[in-house]
Amino acid sequence: MTRTTPPRPVDAEALFPELAAYRGRTTRLHPRPGTPTVGESSVGGPFLWPADEPWPVCVEPHRRRYGDRTQDVRTERRILAEAWARTPAPGAMPGPTPEEGEILSSFKRGRHAPWLEDTDPIPLLAVAQLYARDVPGLGTPAGQDLLQLLWCPFDAHHGRHEPAVVLRRRRSADVTDALAEQPEPVVVGAKGYVPSPCVLDPEIVTEHQDLALLPDELQQRILDWEGDEEEQDEDSVLYHSDLSVAPGWKVGGFAAWNAGDPTLPGCDCGPMELLLTVASHEWDNGSRSWIPLEDLAGADAMDASVPTQVTVGRWGSLLVYTCPTADPAHPPRFVFQG
């Protein structure tokens, strides 16, 4: 289903002509629940992976026995989705049946993989794969037309509270014998690190640089235009919410810096470029003007704004930055927000 971002409530550049110098293009991915194949761009779908190439594993020391069973997370989501999609019988309450409730109540966090030592290799979890033919601005170098993102779904890496992330690029035509069954960890540290299978409907939109990265004088003029917070209501048009950075999963464009100072990583070649944003929300109460036209009628339905079921931190995002020259020898940088 095609998804269309509504026009911005006002023309930001008509109000502030200097913003033309801070205009950018991004590709909103619009992930929505589906059944993607290895030949499609997806979130949480199967990867096109060579059968003779080892699947990435995590060997960094951290506790990997305790958490939620990966399969339980998937089963719970399936039961809940089916339950809330059903029309209840006359006089019955909507939601899971008593039998389904018993199954759901049996899913507990615990020590589900007692055989694992803290340094045993565990497979990374497939998060997203993007084909250059589907996603404008993907910027795959040297004929590599496929980008794949994986992570270790535990918040215990590099001495910080975050997952370990791996980025792979490849030429899809080189994969003549694809892996039939991709590995995944038995246990995950958080349910939000298990992406639900989603198909994509990429859409190019225009956005503007985050307020924190604009010149001070322009920032102040925008704040003056917005007025006092006490006078703002749900119908107020705000730069940060409505006129600057598009929310949700996207490729390219700008990052939204909702808290703290911007963290812009650099490379020997110069400032790094934002490649991919992995978001916990497609929209929230502050960014409802970005809800696609096709989603407006059901925007308040359960999980409508979290189709991937991915949660980064406390409803934050993962920003993937790459070398501006796309030099494969220069590693990407991963910035976690929230």
Image (cartoon, grey):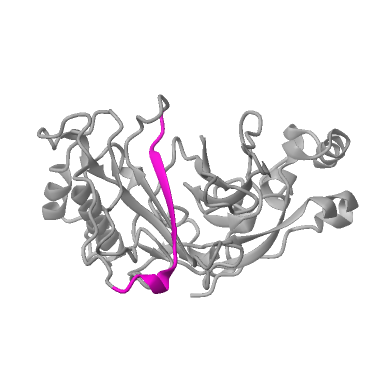
> Residue 313's spot in the image, x, y percent?
44, 36
Tally of numbered discs: 0
Q: Is residue 262 above or below residue 324?
A: above
Report whether 72 appears left or right of 40: left
For the point 51% across and 69% down, which residue is it? 201
> Residue 18's spot in the image, x, y percent?
88, 49
Q: Which residues are magenta?
A: 161-176
For the point 49% across and 67% down, which residue is it? 145
Q: Is residue 240 above or below residue 217?
A: below
Q: Single out the residue that lies furthest toward the front.
A: 329
The foreground one among 226 and 66 is 66
Q: Quadrant of residue 199?
A: bottom left
Q: Is residue 300 above or below residue 62?
A: below
> Residue 23's spot in the image, x, y percent?
77, 55
Is 10 part of what is drawn in magenta?
no
For the point 85% across and 42% down, which residue is it? 225
Q: Quadrant of residue 222?
A: top right
- The answer to whether residue 93 shows anywhere in this view is no
> Residue 239's spot in the image, x, y percent?
74, 46
Report whether 295 appears left or right of 114: right
Report whether 334 appears left or right of 8: left
Q: Single out the residue that lies furthest toward the top.
A: 159
- The answer to whether residue 127 shows anywhere in this view is yes
Report whether 160 appears left or right of 282: left
Is 171 part of what is drawn in magenta?
yes
